[in-house]
Image (tube, grey):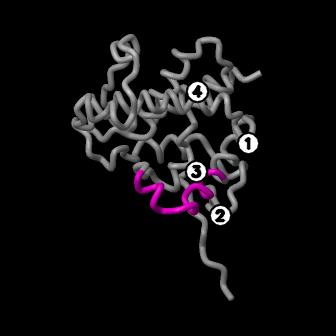
Amino acid sequence: MVKSRAWQRMLSGRRLDLLDPTPVDIEIDDIAHGLAFLARWNGQTRGDFAYSVAEHSLLVENIFSFLNPASKPKWQLSALLHDAPEYVIGDMISPVKASVGTGYGELDNKLAAAIHLRFRLPAMIPQSIKGKIKKADRISAWLEATQIAGFSEVEANKYFRKPEMSIIDRFEIILRPPVEVRNKFISRCTELILSLT
């Protein structure tokens, strides 16, 4: 019996097995490219460019670093890469993820572990750090919802919890072309990797 194909060829030339990913087949350029061309909110955002997962990831890392100024570069990198598996499995809004069942989550976890190991992070991020990244992610979702996704503040507060005014006033979403976002993602990732101790 012939085994079904479960790999995807990346632009780097790597063949990434989605069911059994290995760190050696993961490249930052592939992640950055995939995330920069992947729209959040299923593309339902205002502006001339889609709001990409790469742009979201940069914002989450920025918020995380603002809220946790003494955080180590490895945790900043973890925040930047928090949605990295989506470069091959795509982005789904939370209600759809919940209805799909455990399959998506299992793929996400396997890919996340391989990505973390590739960039010298723990395969499993400590819960205390994951909680801080999740907080930054929720803040990002509120900002995105109100600034570009058409939510009223009342509606956004219901789903994402309103952040403090100091945070709302500090972060403004500006849409950029995918290539610019891809390059910024690579640059920030490289900077953090080089600062790991």
The Cα–Cα distance between marks 4 and 2, rounded to whole angstroms, is: 28 Å
The Cα–Cα distance between marks 1 and 4, rounded to whole angstroms, is: 17 Å
The image position of residue 185, as x and y in percent, is: 50, 32
Q: What stretch is highlighted in magenta?
A: 95-109
The image position of residue 98, as x and y in percent, is: 47, 55
Q: Earlier in the sequence, mark 4 or mark 3?
A: 3
User: Which residue lies at the image location 65% right of the left edge and 29% below the top edge?
Assistant: 129
User: Which residue lies at the image location 34% right of the left edge and 38% below the top edge?
Assistant: 51
Please give the label number shown on residue 19: 2
| Residue that mark 1 sits on | 123
Q: How crowded is mark 1: few (under 14 residues within 10 Å), some or many (20 or more)?
A: some
SS for dot 2: loop
SS for dot 4: helix
Judged left or right of residue 25, residue 143 is left
User: Which residue lies at the image location 69% right of the left edge and 40% below the top edge?
Assistant: 116
Residue 176 is at least partly visible in this image? no
| Residue that mark 4 sits on | 132
| Residue that mark 3 sits on | 12
Q: Depth check: 166 or 3 in front?
A: 166
Amino acid type, mark 4:
Lys
Q: Earlier in the sequence, mark 1 or mark 4?
A: 1
Amino acid type, mark 1:
Ala
